[in-house]
Amino acid sequence: MKESGMSKKELSKELEKRLLDDLRYNSGKIIGSMCTSPNTFAKKVYANFLEKNLGDPGLFPGAAQLEKEVIQMMGKLLSHPEAVGNIVTGGTEANLLALEAFRHRKMECTSTSSHGEVVVPSSAHCSLDKAARLLGLKIIKTPLTRKFKADVEAMKQAITSKTIAVVGIAGTTSLGLVDPIREISELAMENNLFFHVDAAFGGFVLPFLRELGYKIPDFDFRVPGVSSITIDPHKMGLAPIPSGGILFRDSDSQKAITWEVPYLAGGRTLQTTLTGTRSGSSVIAVWALLQHLGREGYRNIVRRCMTLTQKFAADIRGISGLDLVVEPVTNVVGIKSTNIQVEKIAMELRKRGWAVSLFPNHMRIVVMPHVQRVHLEQLLRDLELVVKELGS
Ligand code: PLP
């Protein structure tokens, strides 16, 4: 830090220069991310309420009430308006809170401190590994079916006396697929286990695809064994970062992650998030955005993304040397090659400025709301050129 400060004008210029290399969503080059440019109205709302701290909700009862309403709206979207939960920093915190709730409940039930196990399909997001390490839990990863979904039989085999919870994914990170949530739910109920559904990505896609007439398997609280769901407004919800969401079916799970903070200016507080001080503006922006877009607004966004996704997927099939890993179920396209290492293709695309996402055997394109038809057409042209060059 310098002794005397710089002028705002000087700093604005400096920031422009310093951030020049950051990619912009409107360039269309970010085609491998699950985040997008937040809704313009939501950004304005967010910027207006930066001082709100929901770590001390006694000071901000209005914002705290809006959080309750947001949770109720998201609960309704996921077939359970009575759900309890919080807006948190993202899917990572949401997944961690779910596992912590279940670890704590199981520990209390069995009066042990032994480290439990959590059975997850190997497509699970790495945030579950992080959570497990922090919580002293052991993650047991089970293989997928040939269709890249959770193999319920393999999960069944992995359950032991130490298992506390199972996880299913509704909108997998790598391919956007939905695990057989009903079957996993049966497994969980038969074995008296908690069941967390990670719908960080799918939570703001699948309900609307269903309303649009797509065949979407049940994945939310209408499935009786589902104990909790992660649903992130800062992905397909179009909310400003940070805004993740954790919803629990019942208050017992939330009680298990309740920390009492006695000293706060707003009075004795029961916090149910990992963070103490936390963004009230995230909550207010999500509340305003859900009211502003309504189900119809989200349906239109999802319809557009899905239409573009299906056209893009068909065009990929038309390029010799490329193929889809699987037919897209959401706005995520997995691309593999029949004759070239996919990593080489991804590197060539990155050289051309495309921010593509790379997995061990495929590239991932996420057709987020900022992605337009022209961007995908340009990408297809570059893909065709790259595949021709590398294949010759
Ligand atoms: N869960 C799933 C299925 C995800 O795809 C992601 C991120 O893409 C996360 C959790 C983690 O979310 P975040 O990056 O918001 O912490």
Image (cartoon, rainbow, N blue to C red):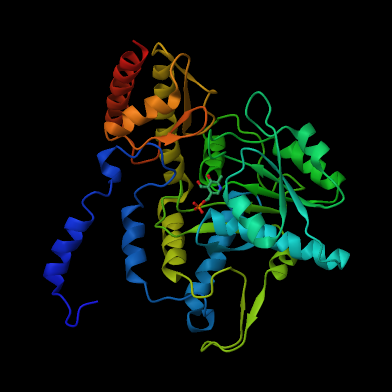
State the image coordinates of residue 322 (x, y, percent, origin top left).
43, 17
From the viewer's side, name the closer residue of 168 and 142: 142
Q: Residue at x 66, y 41 (%)?
A: 219
- The vertical placement of 385 against 230, above or below, is above
Q: Quadrant of residue 374?
A: top left
From the viewer's side, name the closer residue of 1 and 52: 1
State the image coordinates of residue 216 (x, y, percent, origin top left).
61, 33
State the image coordinates of residue 358 (x, y, percent, origin top left).
45, 34
Q: Specify the quadrant that holds the C terminus.
A: top left
Q: Residue at x 63, y 57 (%)?
A: 131
- The vertical placement of 303 against 287, above or below, is above
Residue 247 visible somewhere in the drawing = no
Q: Is residue 184 left or right of residue 265?
A: right
State the image coordinates of residue 375 (x, y, percent, origin top left).
29, 31
Residue 384 visible somewhere in the drawing = yes
Q: Is residue 151 left or right of residue 73?
A: right
From the viewer's side, name the closer residue of 386 and 369: 386
